[in-house]
Image: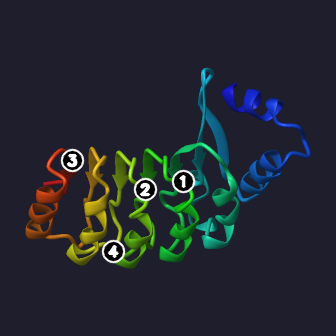
Amino acid sequence: MAFLQAKKQESPASPEAKTIAAIEKSGGTVRTLAQNDDRLEVAFNLQGASVTDKDLPPLAQLKKVACVNLAKTAITDAGLAYLKPHTDLLQLHLELTKVTDAGLAQLTGLKKLEYLNLYGTAVTDAGLKHLTALTSLKNLYLWQTKVTKEGVDKLKQSLPKADINTGV
């Protein structure tokens, strides 16, 4: 319902409406968080591997994005560049994607990020250094990655308030 209301507020020819239409054409969804909160949640996770980096440019054009779900898609490190404009992003799902350490470098500007899920990615201890700038991080999921206990312990020194879950 909130999504329909958000769409009605935009005229059919507005740039935001065209951007939302492009995301929907790729199988993504764009919804407002709540009736009294016009921030957006963008999700591609239900489309699986058919979603690739080529589907993400419209994402960079949206305003007020709070949550992005790219889980189980075929996005790579290159696709994470489209998240850079979203410095107010709070939640990011990257589980079971092709993201590696190099992609984490693209996330350093997301200073308000509170939730990051990297479950099942190829992230290693080397990539964790890019997360030290994410001082608002409260929840980080690293199950089935190549991160070691030593890497987590070192990251915990930089992010003492974060709950870093490795599945053990």
Of pointers 3 and 2, the one earlier in the residue sequence: 2
Query: Which residue is under mark 2?
Result: 110
Q: Residue furthest right?
A: 13
Q: Which mark is residue 122?
A: 4
Please determine whether, in this image, residue 65 is positioned above or below residue 121: above
Total labels: the figure holds 4
The residue positioned 39% from the left and 78% from the top of the image is 102
Query: Which residue is under mark 1?
Result: 86
Query: Which residue is under mark 3?
Result: 162
Task: Kindly report which numbered mark, 4 or 1, lies closer to the viewer in this rendering.
Answer: 1
**Separation of marks 1 and 3 at Cα, in angstroms:** 21 Å
Residue 7, image x, y percentages:
78, 35
Proximity of marks 4 and 1: CB atoms separated by less than 8 Å: no
168 on left or right of 20: left
Of pointers 4 and 1, the one earlier in the residue sequence: 1
**Separation of marks 3 and 2 at Cα, in angstroms:** 15 Å
50 on left or right of 83: right
Residue 161, image x, y percentages:
18, 44
Proximity of marks 1 and 2: CB atoms separated by less than 8 Å: yes
Amino acid at the residue labelled 2: Leu
Q: Of 145 and 59, which appears nearest the observer?
A: 59
Of pointers 4 and 3, the one earlier in the residue sequence: 4
Assign the C terminus to one quadrant of the image: bottom left
The residue positioned 61% from the left and 57% from the top of the image is 47
Q: Of 83 and 120, which appears nearest the observer?
A: 83
Amino acid at the residue labelled 1: His
**Separation of marks 1 and 2 at Cα, in angstroms:** 7 Å
